[in-house]
Each structure stands twice: as C-alpha cells, then as structure tokens.
Image (cartoon, rainbow, N blue to C red):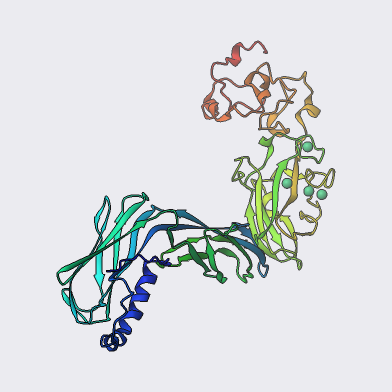
Amino acid sequence: MAVSVKRRRRASWGFVAAVTAVVIAATGVFAQAAGANPPDPTRPDIELTVNASIDRPFTWQIDKTADKQDVTLQPGETTSVTYTVTVTPTEGTTRWSAVGEIIVYNKELDAVTVNSVTNVISGVGPATVTCQGAPLPRQLNSGAQLRCRFFADLPDNSNRTSTATASVGSSSFTVSAPVDFGTPIDNRIDHCVSVNDSYAGLLAEQICVNKVDKTVTYTREIGPYAECGEYTVPNTAWAITQHTDTRVEDSFNVKVNVPCPRPCELGDYVWKDKDKDGKQDESWMYGINGVRLELLNASGAVVATTTTANHPTTGKPGYYRFTVECGKEHKVRVKASNFANGGALGDYVLTTRNAAADNIDSDGNPLTNASHAVVVASGADLTVDFGFVSKKKDCDDEYGKDDRYRHDRDNCDRDDRCDKDDKHKYGGYGSDRYDRDDDCRDHDRDDYDRDRCKDDHWNSGYGRDDRDYDGHDRDKGGWH
Ligand SMILES: [Ca+2]
Ligand SMILES: [Ca+2]
Ligand SMILES: [Ca+2]
Ligand SMILES: [Ca+2]
C-alpha cells in the first residue's frame, strides 16, 4: 500500500475552493474512469496537501484637505483650489491557519466504502474537513478518487504537523505533512483600495499597502458667483477596499465669501470752531448736535436730510452720515432753518473754509451754506465737515480780564462748554475752579443746579444769576 505525500502550493483557501468547483464539475469523468481496468496501482491510497496560511487584514483611513479653506471672491471671479487626498492603511490582527486537501484513491478492482476522512493538527486538534459529493460513508468505485479539503484556525505560527486519516472498508490509511510557516500563504485582505471623489470621480483605481506615495491631488476651479453672499463648496473623497468593499470617506468644505458691495457714505462732523482758525482743533465737547443737514444731488435737489447727533461708536457730539450713491456727485448743505432764532445755529456763522487739510477743515461755503461737490467712489468720505463761530463778541475782547463787574455775559460769547482756555475768572469763581482742565470728561455741568439760582436773592448783576454753585458763597467770594 503506497502512501505518499504531495504538496502543492496554493494561493489561498479561496483558490482551493475554485479548484474544488472544477473537480466537482468533472465528477462524470471519474464515474467513467471508475470502470477503467485496471486502476493505477502506483497511485497512493491517500494523498495530503497542506499549507500554512497567514491572513493579514488591513483597514484604511482617508484624509481630504485643500490648499484653501476660506476664499474671498468678487462676483464673477474664480479661483483654483488644489485638493489632496491621502489614504493610510493599518494592518489588523494576523490570523494563522492550516489549509489543505486530502485525496482518497481506490486502486482496488472493486468498489470500497469510505467511512470517514479526518485531519488532526498537532497541538490543536481536528480540522474541519469537507468532502465532495454525498456525505460519508459512501461507495468509491474502482479507480475513482474522493477529494476533501480541510481548514483549521491556529493560535500562532508555530510549525505543526497535519495528519490525515481515511477509513476505507476495514482499512485505515494515514499520511502526515508539516504545517510549515517558513513558506506560508501570505493572504493579505483588503491590502488595496480604489479612491474616488465626489467632484473628480475616480482618483486612483488601486492604491496598495506597498505603494510609497498614497496621496492623490487634483485642482478644481471654484466660482464664479453672480450674487454676493456666503457659499460652501463641499467635496467628499472615499476609498473602497479590495476584498470586503469597506468604504471610508472624508469631506473638505471650502467656504467662499463673495462680499456684497458696501454703500458709499458721506460725513461727518459739525463743530464750534472756538478759536476761529478754521481747524478742528477744539475739544470733542465742541461738536454740535441737532444741526439739520441736507444731501443734494448733482442737480441740486435735496435727496436726503439728517441731523447731527452723538457718534454711534464714540458717543461724542456733532456727527452725521449720509448714504450716497457711489460714483455720483453730491453736496452737503446746512439747512437754513438752523440759523433761525432759537435754531441749533441761531448764534453762529460758518467759519473760514478750506483753512487746513480737508480732513480737519471746514467745507461750508458761507454764500450757499453747502459744501463743495464730492464724489465717493467707494467706502466712506468723512471729510465733509462744517465749523461754526459765534456771532457774539468774545467776552475777552469786550471786557478784558480785569473787568469783573459789568460785562453782560448773555451778550458775549462766553462759551457754555467747558473751556480750559477761558481766561475769565468771572468774579473770583473762575472756571478753573471747576476742574475744566481735564477736558471736561468728568465734568458734568448738570450737577450744577441752575434752576435753583433763578430765585436766588443774590444778584451778580452781570446776567448769569441762574447759577448756583453749591457750596460756593458768592456773597463771601470777596470780589464785591
Ligand atoms: Ca479751531
Ligand atoms: Ca476743505
Ligand atoms: Ca473737509
Ligand atoms: Ca470729518
């Protein structure tokens, strides 16, 4: 009884299955051969093919990025964005197994009964054996063969022995072969992926673990956009593994800002030019609120009006802003009603115009009360300002410092605002006493109850008898 061992290297268990399918298809040939006379006496009764197999599964990650994330485009503009897609494999847990084939051959002249076919891996135990055709036990004709395959999971890659045993009639045939991990079947699972992209389509048909450069780049145009606004350009890339069709994906969004054109603006300051030099070199306290202004178009028609008020950001007085059509000619005019008695500018006339750089001068023409024509191409032009001077004589001019008794304060320009430059001492309670040197930022004149003074029995005789400076005894001021 010849017993031999035949080894054949196979690509994988899957490949073994394919071979088996072929053998099953050829069963009819064996059936005919069953009657062959005589059977081949040189063939062994049992043959064993065994392979050590290593399964190495891979998982993949994908990362998508681009050279731009936030893009600003003007309407109609485009930009190129280069995307980078990188796939990265990670080797999973290795699995070891023994796989192989057992062939039982009937070289007798008569049919025999195959009772069982087994395979035992040393140190592990029986393998799973699957034979072709009807279940065992069954007849095997003279000259016919029975093919069985087996599979056994192994705890590690130690070299072991696979022993196949066929019980045929009253005989038993045994054959052994090593499970040799020196030359295993290297069964890599999902070691390659294909890479796709929602914009660019197929980026790479196959990237495998051994490829050095696992990065794909491509460039696309973004835009143009007709309308201003915020846009998001999404892009997703994904990889699909070769064997298990596992999909991983990553997205990268490019944000596009198409700025809406900002309206053009004209402004912004009306102030009392205390020192009458035509320059905005006064304290911020000299801004004048409540002045009505008109916006004139190129034809001289009034297209908008506004009133000076506290600056929305700084809170300082005297500011205005007109929204104007970009690129068109406009003038700003001080409304005539301001100059009426009791109007915001009742006691004022325009100061010298164009006395300094345009950003710090006054632009009102005394003949028209209007500025020069201004064209704002874009953004804001805040150089259209109006300075005013009091029509009243300056108190200094009229009376001089030494006169403390008779000058009529109602009829000279005694500035109501805090004025650190004021040279008047006004009968001994000079303004210096009220901390005017601090630019009046902390000086709240409302703290001084003027109304109380109306009934004040005390009469200074120079017209400002409506002041009651608490704690200040003007009778004892020593200036009578
Ligand atoms: Ca000035
Ligand atoms: Ca000017
Ligand atoms: Ca100006
Ligand atoms: Ca200004």
Quarter residue 70 falls in: bottom right
233 relative position to 131: left or right: right
Count numbered badges in the picture: 0
Q: Position of residue 386 (x, y in %)?
A: 74, 47
227 relative position to 22: left or right: right
Residue at 78% across / 27% down in the picture? Answer: 396
Residue nearer the viewer, 472 or 237: 237
- Of the 4 image quadrants, the one containing the C terminus is top right
Quarter residue 469 falls in: top right
Q: Position of residue 58 (x, y in %)?
A: 44, 58
* Residue 295 seen anywhere in this rendered image of the structure: yes
Residue nearer the viewer, 63 or 324: 63
Residue nearer the viewer, 28 or 192: 28
* 28 w.r.t. 407: above or below: below
Residue at 60% across / 22% down in the picture? Answer: 459
Residue at 46% across / 58% down in the picture? Answer: 60
* Residue 238 seen anywhere in this rendered image of the structure: no
224 relative position to 403: left or right: left
Q: Position of residue 95 (x, y in %)?
A: 36, 55
Residue at 54% across / 64% down in the picture? Answer: 207
* 380 w.r.t. 288: above or below: below
Residue nearer the viewer, 332 or 428: 332
- Of the 4 image quadrants, the one containing the N terminus is bottom left
* 187 w.r.t. 104: above or below: above
Quarter residue 129 falls in: bottom left
Q: Position of residue 34 (x, y in %)?
A: 26, 85
* 190 w.r.t. 469: above or below: below
